[in-house]
Amino acid sequence: MFVFSPPAESDLRSWAPVFALIILSVGFGLAEPKFVSLANLLTIADRSAIPLILSVGMTFVVLQGSIDLSIEGVMATGSLVFAMSVLNSRTELDLGPFGLLAAALAGACLGFVNGTAITWFRVPSFLVTLGIWSVGAGIAMLLSGDQPPLIRDPLLSAMGLGRSLGVPNLFLLSGIVLLIGYVLQNFTRFGRYSLIIGGGEHLARLHGLPVDRYKVLAFTFAGLLSGLAGALESARVGLGHVDIGSGQMLATITAVLVGGTSLNGGRGGVLQSAVGVFTLAVVTNGMIFVGISPYAQQAVYGVLILMAALVTAYSLRASPGIVK
Amino acid sequence: MSDPVLRVDGLHKSFDGVRALDDVSFELYPREVVGLVGENGAGKSTLLNVIAGLLSGDSGQVLVRGHRLPSANISAARAAGVAIVSQEPALLPNITVAENILLGDEAQILRAGLYDWRKLSSIAAAQLAKLSVAIPPLTLTGQLSLRERRLVDIARALAIEERTRQEPIILFDEPTSALDPEGIEIVLGQIEQLRRRASILFVSHRLDEVLRVSDRILVMANGRCVAVRDRRKTDFAELTKLMLGSVLESSVRPLPPVSAQQSAVTLSVRGLVRRNSYSDVSFDLHVGEVLGIAELAGRGADALCRTLFGVFPADSGEIVVHGRRIQLKEPSDAVQLGIGYVPPDRQSEGIVGELGIRENMMLAQCGEIRWGPLIDFGRERKVVKSWIERLRIKTPTADTPAHNLSGGNQQKVVLAKWMIGRKLKILILDRPFRGLDIGATAETMNLVQELARSGLSILLVADTVEELTELSHSIIVMKDGLVADRFSASTVKRPRLQVLERMV
């Protein structure tokens, strides 16, 4: 069935993030051989799992030319819904693995609200999603009260912390999500229309594409993955917590950008975003190995974002043949 | 003759009170190519856009095979078999050629909800094959040349054939513009081929093309359909005359009082080139002179004006102001040198609609009228008031939002914005009468003459030949971005004819 994969931009510029990732990895490896040890690579994979899942959702939103700032709030809701619906210290529920589904559904609902508010009221996505961030955090706080629920389901803890065939479970799971994202992006109308909407929303509307419906879908999908990510992180740390997604929103946007997906929409994809996620994970991990002070790490991130933005701006300027 | 595939019946369309289409009616028969000609602003593009469902008509109807098309509904128009090939190919650069061709009709290539790229590719290839062009369907559209993109656009229009199981009606809006001669030949060849499978309405500003490919020719002027001619029974000269209609009848005007050639040169342009816009433009603009630029179609004159105001640079050539060679990096450099610019699109570039008249007038001189380091609003108000009186701007107060004024009064505000500056030496007017009614046009024209008499140098691009010959001391005729001719309006007996002959 998958005879053709759709053509990617084949110029060198679009491969730049991949080269950057390779150079960084080789550089850190030369500076500190332990960096490339299997144990450390698995650590990097483990650290990348949650960001990978988040970046898949964010990619579709950004491809359409929107942005989703609600990640951390939705993760918080997902975390609490999950923790309180599985065997836990606060409620009588014991949904087991279905707790993941509940969290994903809660996230999808918040994402759906994002999408409908944006398309119905024509409010910029960053405003709506900023609001939903707070709403999500608020719901989580109401659920949590002053006693964060502890997860007591050994199976779920094993899923969050354990490994299969030596590979962290969560990383395997994120690989599945990435694969689904790839198929959605290249083999469904949802994915191709997302690219089209980002490339020229006006044209898309002129051709009768149901633009609003696909926007709602993208935010719902992103919400679903955020909710799921919140639950998975909870399974790992063993409790539901309001701050479960702290720092993930900026990290996800950075990863998507560093991978080469344009904030203007219409360019990029889930694989690119995955490269971005690995780049950030490698930098974070590598900086510890080569002894860069944690205080300087924030600044390094800043420089990364800046560089990614400059490269994107440069490549946009270098292609005057844009037909809009 | 068989029934018409397309019938337009009493179509009217106005933009902000300006008539773009005035009772237009005509028929298009199966497998017929109808050429549509007319001056800039005659309403050709508006007509095409209304038929294609991109714009709504105010009254009148569009019938396709006897069925009335709903207004402003491109999907309905496409479903009825009407496709438009726009001047600027409306393709997305970031998806494949095949996806562009099948845009909005992907259902047929889904298998179990997933894209069947092989099928997508083969369907698109079949459309491209109709044009005998060899563009791989899975190329990214952004990598194609303009010529290829236009062909893809035509292929997309042809895809309607399968979708509606009917011969398509294709509307071509200047499909040859911005193409090189070889590209023009290819596109015209395609249109000649297409008459075997489609009915075509073809807009071009090149009469030779229209005469070559059309069966009948429809002439538009001032939003009206003024004549329909059989190709074999008409010629270049008659069409030209029809296009410009009443313009050719001589009207009297006072000759400009300034003998331009004797006064000093304010602005001198040598060998100015900007790729895809204009090339090798040279002229001198004297003190008190109005230099008119005539251009039937295209954007060369527009781009030239913007270059001279520092909006974007020329690729090569030099600009000399008051004997000094200058570099314009941005508009503020031009303003510093005493250059003012009145853009063609008043609503979006000329005025800031929400701001008051006073603020609009002071835009270019913001903070020039000062009391120490502070803006002297009291004096500013007085200055603005005096200009409102001098230009007879009809407004309740000086702080009325500019978008509440009529077009003519808005244009006066735009002119006042530049006249307030004491440094103003050169004024660039890019189609300043656009969208003004007859009275406002006359008033603005008087103002332009007055300004020239007071010693300002004026570069004028106008939509109609009438406006140009009425106001200019000398006239440059631009065609396809090149200066085709330059002459002095006072030495030529019938300047209008001269302009027309060079223009078409």
Image: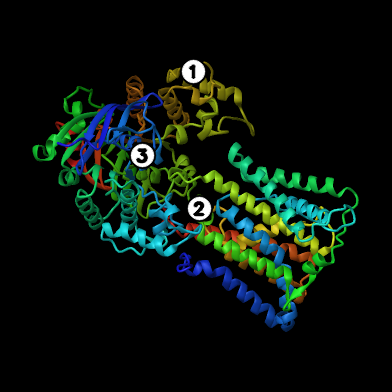
| Color scheme of the displayed model | rainbow
Gap in angstroms between the C-alphas marked 1 and 3: 43 Å
Gap in angstroms between the C-alphas marked 3 and 2: 22 Å
Element assignment for label 2: helix
Instruction: State the image coordinates of residue A50 (x, y, percent, origin top left).
Output: 71, 63
Q: Amino acid at mark 2?
A: Tyr
Query: Front-most of B74 and B423?
Result: B74
Q: Is circle 1 on the same chain as circle 2?
A: no
Label 2 marks a residue whose chain is: A
**Quadrant position of residue A163:** bottom right
Classify mark 2: residues with Cα within 10 Å, few (<14), some (14-19) or many (20+). many
Label 3 marks a residue whose chain is: B
- Seen at 72% across and 68% down, the residue is A170
Q: Amino acid at mark 3?
A: Ala
Query: Front-most of B351 and B381?
Result: B351
Q: Is residue A137 visible?
A: yes
Element assignment for label 1: loop
Element assignment for label 3: helix
Q: Amino acid at mark 1?
A: Thr
Residue farthest toward the left in the current orientation of the protein: B233
Classify mark 1: residues with Cα within 10 Å, few (<14), some (14-19) or many (20+). some
Q: Is residue B242 above or below residue A16?
A: above
Residue A193 shows which numbered tag?
2
Q: Which residue is mark 3?
A: B77
Q: Which residue is mark 1?
A: B395
Instruction: State the image coordinates of residue A319 (x, y, percent, origin top left).
Output: 45, 59
Q: Is residue B445 above or below residue A292?
A: above
